[in-house]
Structures are given as structure tokens and as C-alpha cells.
Image (cartoon, rainbow, N blue to C red):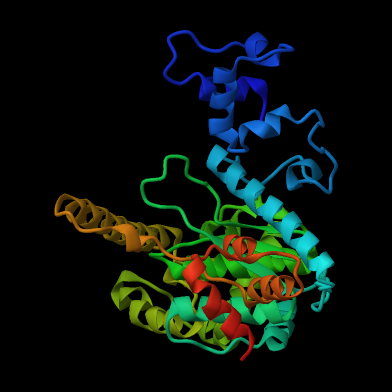
Amino acid sequence: MSVEELLPLISVGLAKPITKEQILSPNIELGYLKRIDKVFNKGIHYYLDPKSPDILKDASIFFRKTKFDVDLSLGARKIVNHFEEFKISLSAIAELSDIKFERVLPVFTVNTDPKVVAKEVRGLINPEFKTKDKDFLTEIIKKLAEKNILVFEFVETWNKKEKANIDGFFLKPNVIVLKRHQISFKREIFTLAHELGHYLLNEEEIDQIDYQDFFNQKLSRIESWCNDFAFYFLSGEFEKSIEAIDNSTPQNDYNIDLIQSISEQTHLSRIAIFTKLLLLKKISPANYNKVKAGFEEDFRIKTEELKNKRELDKQNGINLGGSTPIPIKSPLLVSTIQTAFYEGIINEYEFCKKLNIKPEKLDSYLYESSN
């Protein structure tokens, strides 16, 4: 973040904005320092450390890459920073516990056919089909854990001010992070498959997924490859069924029932399938846009209804404390923290903090490890 970008953030509510000289001088007022910390959430002690922060490539993806495919919001940068720090902390714990996250799946290149790779990798991971989208997402996360790939979710509450304008990202060597899409798990599943593509190419990226990027000529070869891989990974044997669909027109109601059926059996969203039909020239751009607009309106209405329900519940004094979704925990994360605890590397407090659980849940996680 540049100084010019920081100054407006720390000057909110002040009649006289804070200047560059006031925060870059040898001495800085405590009030200014507290305002700065409201942006970065590091704690005052962080700024008093005489040691300069590391700017080595190993320290952060922001030093390893100079450009991303999305202009990251402050909320997005905070999320990436949080998980990067967590990854570093977990790696240290794993090393002290003599745990190795050795790569199991091979590395591919963009010159390899993504359809061929998708078939091979799906066979290696072999996720069990689940009827519910969330259950299938959990299944893939579990299967990836068996291949030493850590998957994390981050949850944004509906009233959060600093929204993250990203859907997911991949951090070397083995971390995938996803934004929880409580209303649309299919989108989250596609994002996971897309980020798995980045892992297979061993190319880091921070992504905002748009199904229309399937035919976006401005995309890099890597992003196009990951989109194609994600589609073929999720479509599986239904790829041929999708290719065999007749032209979608208003006369046949855009094959909506058939596409809905395929969506339920593949966990691909309907718009992802329609996007593929657009690529296959089996739906016109005009009809595609009509269908897409219809889906977006349905989603908007659904989101608005949920928002109104929350407001009504709040007015009626209904406790909304249990409404925030709980992130899915990777079995690889749980087993790593359990091992560190048994080895005496971390204590009970750190165990609960790393897994984000309440102390009363400790025994259930420790008992789980013995079965």
C-alpha cells in the first residue's frame, strides 16, 4: 500500500487530513499510530519493533508477484495477508512436529491439454459424489487433504464494511483459500477447481471468478487453462452430455430442465454450463445474456430476501449469533494441529486458536484424532 493510499484511510472523520510528513517523521503521535493500526490490525507493538519487515519473496505473494488479475480491495489484501501469515505459522509448527507436506500430485504446464489433465487428476483425487453442493465441497477438501493440499475458507458477514473482491487464491506450495459462498456453493466449488488448476501449474494467483472469462480473449494462458481445467474436472463424464445438447432457444425454453439436471449431477452451476454452450455456439450471445440476466435477478432477489429476513429478525429481538457460517476445516489442518499438540509444540490455548474453536470443543477434537 502506498502512503498516498493510506492517508485518506487514516484521516476519516478528521477536519484536517493527516499529512505524509506527520507519519513519516522520526517521531509519530500515538493517535496517528492507532489510526494506522485500525487499517492493518497488527497491534501497536508491531510498529515499535526496530527491525524492518521482511520484503523477501518468501515473505509474501505481494513481493513475489507485481501484478494480479484483479485490482485488490483493502479487504482482499487483508484476507490474503492473514492466510499468508497463517501459512507461515503452520509451516513452522509442521516443521517442529516433523510433518512433511510433500507434493503428491504432479506439476503440469499450460501446454498440456486441460481436459486430459482434468480426467487424470479427477481419477487421482476420486471425490465421492454428494447430492448437496456443500457436502461435495467438503468431500473435495477432504480428498485434497489426502494429497497434502490445504484448503481454507474465509467468511464475510453481510454487514462487513471492507469486502474482499476476490473468490479465492493459491499460495505456494500447497495452500488454497476460498471465499464462502453460502448462497451459491457451486460458485465456490468452481473456484476450488480453478485454484486447484493453479496448484497443478504451480502458479500463484489471486482470483475473482467470472464464468464469462471462459471466452475472454484478454485472459492470460494460465487463467484460461485453469478455467478449462475446472470445467472438465467438474463435468467429468457429463462433458459429452453437455456437448450433445441441442441449440438452446426460447422455443425449447433454453433446455433449462436438462441443464438443471446436469447441474445437479456435476455441481457445475447452470450459468457455467450455458457459458460452455455459448463457446460451442449452441446458444446465441443475445439469448445467453437473457438467461444470465434472469439468473442474476433471481440471485439478487434471493439475497435481498435474506437481508430483509435478518433485519426483521433483528427488529424482533431474535439472536443472530448463530447465523454466521462456520468455515469447513481441512482434515490436514486438524491432523497437523493435533500432532503439534501431542508433541508439546503448542498448548491448549494455541490449539483452540489455530482451529478457531471454543475451549469446550477441545476434547471432541482430541477424541476425534484417536478414532
Image position, residue 254 (x, y; %): 36, 73
Height in image: 170 above or below 186?
A: above
Image position, residue 189 (x, y; %): 53, 70
Q: Quadrant of residue 228?
A: bottom right
Image point (45%, 66%), residue name:
326
Image point (37%, 51%), residue name:
158
Query: Which quadrant of the figure contains the N terminus?
Result: top right
Image position, residue 132 (x, y; %): 42, 82
Q: Quadrant of residue 335?
A: bottom right
Query: Which quadrant of the figure contains the C terminus?
Result: bottom right
Q: Is residue 66 left or right of residue 75?
A: right
Can residue 221 be seen here? The reply is no
Q: Observer-nearest residue: 40 or 252?
A: 40
| Number of numbered callouts drawn | 0
Q: Is residue 266 left or right of residue 33?
A: left
Height in image: 104 above or below 48?
A: below
Image point (35%, 57%), residue name:
296
Can residue 201 be seen here? The reply is yes
Q: Observer-nearest residue: 196 or 80?
A: 80
Image point (66%, 71%), residue name:
333
Image position, residue 105 (x, y; %): 79, 77
Q: Observer-nearest residue: 185 or 109?
A: 185
